[in-house]
Image (tube, helix red, strand yellow):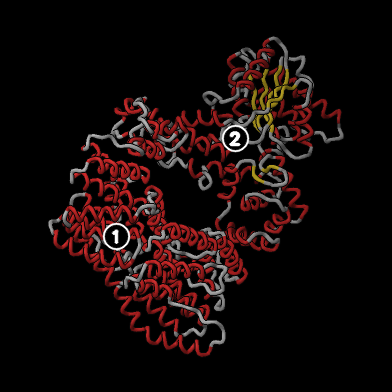
């Protein structure tokens, strides 16, 4: 709502106490017979009218005669129109016993009956102005007179001449002249107003913008809600504290659709829905848009056109670009620019911009959509000609209408390439816009292929559509190879493995370069392993692919590419080849996959090689490889579909970094779900998260993670289901559902053998042994364990061997079980597989306790508790603690530290202390300037470490003495 003088005073003008004091002082002086001038200067919306209205109200309270007028640009040609308004305003307030105001109006009409004197006729002007002065004095009679002229810059020149005449005579009179003036360009009006404002009798008020604190108060009073500070920050950023803009937004927020008034909800019940304060860059009150148009239309031409252009650009450093877009001459642009700066709509400086962002948005909204589109097209051409960055040009092309212009397509392709190089998601928007242009026939394949490749990380279903179309329009063999590879991965992400195999096989036999064939076959090898159907279909195509590659090698003169490395690694793992040999081949594969190498083995082989290092218990190497793989893929713009994050999660889990593993898996899961529909990576990431949560003892969140994604009962025969079946089977065992858990684990082991993926040739399916034993099938468990133990000895890796020794031990005779566990402990001595070491120490200690060897059991359980605590494997730590308690001995090391306040981090201690004092999570977050989620996380960790379950237990736990050795 726009503030007018007739609106009535605003309740409680904010941060205007100094101005109010000056007004009161001026009126007190008038009461004592001392006249003067009060000038309120400022840009539109700074509250000048409100201050004049307050002056009028206080003057009326003092029984002064108040005459008021308002300048209007549409009446500026009516001579003495503002003076006539002054007289007319006294119609209802003429002095008792004096002549009616109409009589004085007749005197003015008589004065204006003839022509107004010309500029050179000083005597004529003096006579006229003197008579007007006498009319106003006669109208006041014995009363003090207050003359108020708002928007004086729009008053007619004869009236301004009169105000200038009056300003020189108020000092010794009983008159206060008050004017409100906006900045205006040079001219007669500015000169006459300058005489008023700079008079010796003048007091000049320049209202400042409202502060952020004032806006918080305004928001709280108008909208209520629990968080006025956040809303005020948005409002301050958009308005720079301009009172008119602030009031316009708040009025609409309070009374518009979705507001408390509009929806019937009580004020102060919470943040009103639809207030728009969080989207002020998109939404502007309609009244403000109308005001902006009226204001700009009142300025000299072509101010409106130039303002539209600056609003379009946001900020301007090159005036020539504005001239080109608005199609203005340098002289016309300079004239309009001066007017906009004088009106304080634009801020002058090296970077030209709007004084208030909200005003810019209002100007944008006042521009019709069709006009905006044409301006964006001109802006793109002008910026491109000036050498602007591709993304800046593309930002305007996104909003310009399609025109079938090849230059537009090329600009959007350049912008997409720049965005891809920085791993930014905008490439998809640019390329989709390029497709709408549309591109000419020779540009269409490039646009489609690059769009599909970019969409792989956003929407694999759309990517498949565009890549298939790109393949149909692409004739160059090398380009077809790249498109086919991306299309195959898009299909694979949607679990369309057989289609992906067909695309790759058909394209491979078209290619003549050995490197290109090897890279496609690398992808084919990976995808064919993902489902039985894809594996069988690959076998159908394998003979012709091999024949084709042999023909290529016969013609080749350069070095031969050693392809199919991924197949070789998986075959070695599946056949139980010694771990050292497999790991050496994996390490060699990764060395050749480095970007600096002449012959890269491909990303699929690199992923397989990294997983092989995990299986072979070369965990530190696997960690480095997984991290490097992720970093290099991002640097080179290669999409690994978050499989690198899943890999890292499994590596960190085995290394004993349980929380880090959970964080990596959760990140991969969230990212995979943001890319269109659920992808094949989602179950893998969810499984990694569940495995980590099981170790932390968070069984309910683990179940919720699967249930929320409808993965609790899903069936399938793809590689993703291997990881899911293992994690889900383990979770069901932990939840006390041995039958369901065993079923999942058996299915997973069978599928692993069928696919030949070797997710873990030894040890990965050890939970099947545990599940069989727990279900009473001791003989089956023992037979499977013995079979796996033989394979583990042949494989030769420490961690898989220890896993089998540990899981087999409970199924055999007690004496042999102890020997197996002793061997497992020895095998893991010095191993980096800390999590498995903790599990093995715990099992060994438990068996020792049941064998009646308390001293030895206590030692192993102490070590297990300490190591489990360090790994953040809280479920295992609790079990070790219970075993120690049954031995009537407290846990030591990390196990003891977890019950001591000294084990808390500084952040956890601060949160726990505040919670112990009774503060809510929200209160703690506000006190510490953190999010509520952060408070919840720290509080959860504190509960675990202090072994408490509620706030009520915190004070006692925090006052507990520090245990020895902590």
Image vertical order of residue 134 relative to residue 32, above or below = below
Choose the circle earlier in sequence order: 1 or 2. 2
How many numbered discs, if any? 2
Q: Looking at this view, is 546 or 391 the one in front? A: 546
The correct choice, above or below, for 219 with respect to 522 in the image is: above
Q: Are marks 1 and 2 in contact (CB under 8 Å)?
A: no
Question: Where is the C terminus found, in terms of image quarters?
Answer: top left
Q: Which residue is mark 1?
A: 724
Specify the farthest residue to the top.
32
Is 453 left, or right, of 835 in this rendering? right
How many residues crowd mark 2 within 10 Å: few (<14), some (14–19), many (20+)?
many
Image location of residue 894, percent across then percent down: 36, 39
Q: Quadrant of residue 920?
A: top left
Which disc number belongs to residue 862?
A: none
Is residue 506 in view? yes
| Label 1 packing within 10 angstroms: few (<14), some (14-19), many (20+) | many
Q: Where is residue 300? Give x, y as percent.
A: 71, 46
> What kind of element bears circle 2?
loop
Image spot of residue 143 (x, y percent): 66, 13
Per the model, the C-alpha gap separating discs 1 and 2 is: 58 Å
- Disc assigned to residue 242: 2
At a point 71% along the width and 11% down the height, the residue shown is 33
Element at label 1 = helix
Q: Nearer the viewer, mark 1 or mark 2?
A: 1
């Amino acid at each position: 709502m726009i503030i007018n003088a007739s609106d009535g005073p605003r309740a409680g003008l904010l941060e205007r106490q100094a101005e109010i004091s000056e007004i009161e002082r001026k009126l007190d002086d008038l009461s004592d017979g001392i006249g003067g001038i009060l000038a309120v200067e400022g840009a539109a919306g700074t509250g000048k009218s409100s201050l004049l209205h307050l002056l009028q109200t206080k003057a009326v309270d003092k029984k002064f005669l108040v005459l008021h007028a308002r300048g209007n640009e549409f009446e500026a040609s009516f001579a003495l129109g503002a003076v006539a308004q002054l007289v007319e305003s006294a119609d209802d307030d003429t002095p008792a016993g004096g002549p009616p105001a109409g009589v004085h109006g007749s005197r003015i009409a008589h004065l204006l009956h003839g022509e107004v004197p010309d500029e050179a006729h000083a005597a004529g002007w003096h006579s006229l102005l003197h008579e007007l002065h006498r009319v106003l004095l006669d109208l006041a009679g014995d009363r003090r007179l207050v003359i108020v002229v708002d928007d004086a810059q729009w008053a007619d020149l004869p009236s301004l001449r009169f105000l200038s005449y009056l300003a020189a005579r108020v000092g010794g009179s009983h008159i206060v002249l008050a004017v409100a003036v906006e900045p205006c360009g040079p001219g007669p009006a500015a000169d006459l107003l300058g005489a008023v404002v700079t008079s010796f009798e003048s007091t000049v008020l320049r209202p400042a913008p409202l502060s952020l604190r004032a806006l918080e108060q305004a928001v709280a009073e108008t909208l209520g809600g629990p968080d006025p500070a956040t809303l005020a920050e948005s409002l301050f950023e958009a308005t720079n504290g301009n009172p008119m803009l602030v009031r316009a937004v708040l009025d609409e927020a309070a009374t518009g659709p979705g507001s408390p008034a509009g929806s019937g909800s009580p004020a102060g019940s919470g943040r009103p829905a639809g207030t728009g304060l969080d989207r002020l860059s998109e939404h502007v009150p309609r009244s403000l848009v109308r005001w902006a148009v009226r204001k700009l239309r009142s300025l000299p031409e072509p101010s409106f056109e130039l303002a539209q252009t600056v609003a379009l650009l946001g900020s301007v450093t090159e005036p020539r670009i504005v001239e080109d877009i608005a199609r203005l001459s340098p002289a016309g642009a300079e004239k309009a620019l001066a007017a906009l700066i004088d009106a304080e709509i634009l801020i002058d400086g090296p970077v030209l911009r709007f004084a208030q962002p909200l005003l810019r948005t209002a100007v944008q909204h006042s521009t019709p959509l069709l006009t905006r589109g044409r301006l964006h097209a001109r802006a793109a051409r002008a910026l491109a000609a000036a050498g602007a960055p591709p993304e800046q040009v593309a930002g305007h092309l996104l909003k310009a209408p399609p025109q079938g212009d090849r230059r537009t397509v090329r600009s959007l392709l350049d912008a997409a390439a720049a965005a891809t190089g920085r791993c930014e998601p905008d490439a998809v928007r640019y390329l989709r816009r390029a497709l709408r242009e549309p591109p000419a026939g020779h540009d269409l394949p490039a646009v489609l292929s690059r769009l599909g490749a970019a969409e792989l990380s956003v929407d694999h279903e759309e990517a498949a559509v565009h890549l298939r179309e790109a393949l149909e329009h692409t004739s160059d063999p090398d380009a077809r190879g790249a498109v086919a590879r991306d299309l195959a991965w898009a299909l694979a992400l949607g679990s369309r493995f057989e289609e992906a195999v067909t695309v790759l096989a058909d394209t491979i036999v078209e290619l003549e370069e050995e490197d290109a064939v090897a890279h496609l076959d690398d992808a084919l090898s990976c995808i064919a392993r993902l489902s039985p159907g894809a594996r069988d279909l690959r076998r159908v195509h394998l003979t012709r692919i091999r024949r084709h590659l042999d023909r290529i090698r016969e013609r080749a003169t350069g070095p031969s590419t050693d392809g199919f490395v991924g197949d070789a690694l998986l075959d070695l793992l599946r056949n139980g080849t010694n771990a050292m040999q497999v790991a050496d081949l994996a390490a060699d594969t990764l060395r050749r996959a480095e970007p600096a190498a002449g012959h890269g083995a491909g990303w699929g082989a690199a992923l397989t090689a990294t997983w092989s290092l995990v299986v072979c218990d070369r965990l530190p190497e696997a960690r480095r490889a997984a991290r490097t793989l992720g970093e290099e893929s991002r640097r080179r713009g290669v999409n690994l579909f978050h499989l690198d994050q899943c890999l890292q999660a499994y590596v960190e889990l085995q290394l004993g970094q349980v929380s880090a593993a959970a964080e990596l898996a959760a990140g991969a899961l969230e990212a995979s779900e943001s890319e269109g529909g659920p992808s094949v990576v989602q179950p893998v990431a969810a499984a990694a998260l569940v495995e980590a949560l099981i170790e932390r003892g968070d069984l309910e969140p683990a179940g919720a993670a699967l249930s929320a994604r409808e993965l609790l009962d899903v069936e399938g025969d793809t590689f993703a289901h291997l990881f899911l079946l293992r994690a889900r089977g383990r979770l069901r065992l932990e939840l006390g559902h041995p039958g369901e858990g065993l079923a999942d684990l058996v299915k997973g082991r069978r599928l692993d053998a069928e696919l030949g993926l070797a997710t873990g040739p030894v040890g990965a399916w050890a939970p099947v042994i545990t599940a069989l034993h727990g279900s009473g099938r001791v003989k089956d468990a023992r037979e499977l364990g013995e079979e796996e133990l033989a394979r583990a000895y042949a494989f030769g890796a420490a961690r898989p061997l220890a896993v089998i020794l540990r899981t087999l031990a409970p199924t055999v005779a007690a004496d042999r079980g102890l020997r197996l566990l002793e061997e497992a402990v020895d095998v893991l001595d010095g191993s980096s597989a800390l999590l498995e070491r903790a599990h093995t120490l715990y099992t060994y200690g438990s068996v020792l306790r049941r064998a009646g060897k308390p001293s030895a059991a206590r030692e192993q359980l102490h070590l297990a508790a300490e190591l489990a605590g360090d790994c953040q494997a809280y479920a295992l730590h609790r079990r070790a603690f219970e075993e120690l308690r049954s031995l009537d001995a407290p846990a030591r090391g990390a196990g003891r530290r977890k019950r001591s306040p000294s084990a808390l981090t500084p952040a956890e201690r601060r949160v726990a202390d505040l919670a112990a004092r009774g503060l809510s999570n929200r209160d703690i977050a506000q006190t510490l300037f953190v999010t509520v989620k952060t408070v919840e996380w720290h509080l959860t960790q504190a509960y675990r470490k202090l072994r408490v379950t509620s706030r009520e237990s915190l004070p006692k736990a925090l006052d507990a003495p520090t245990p020895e050795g902590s």
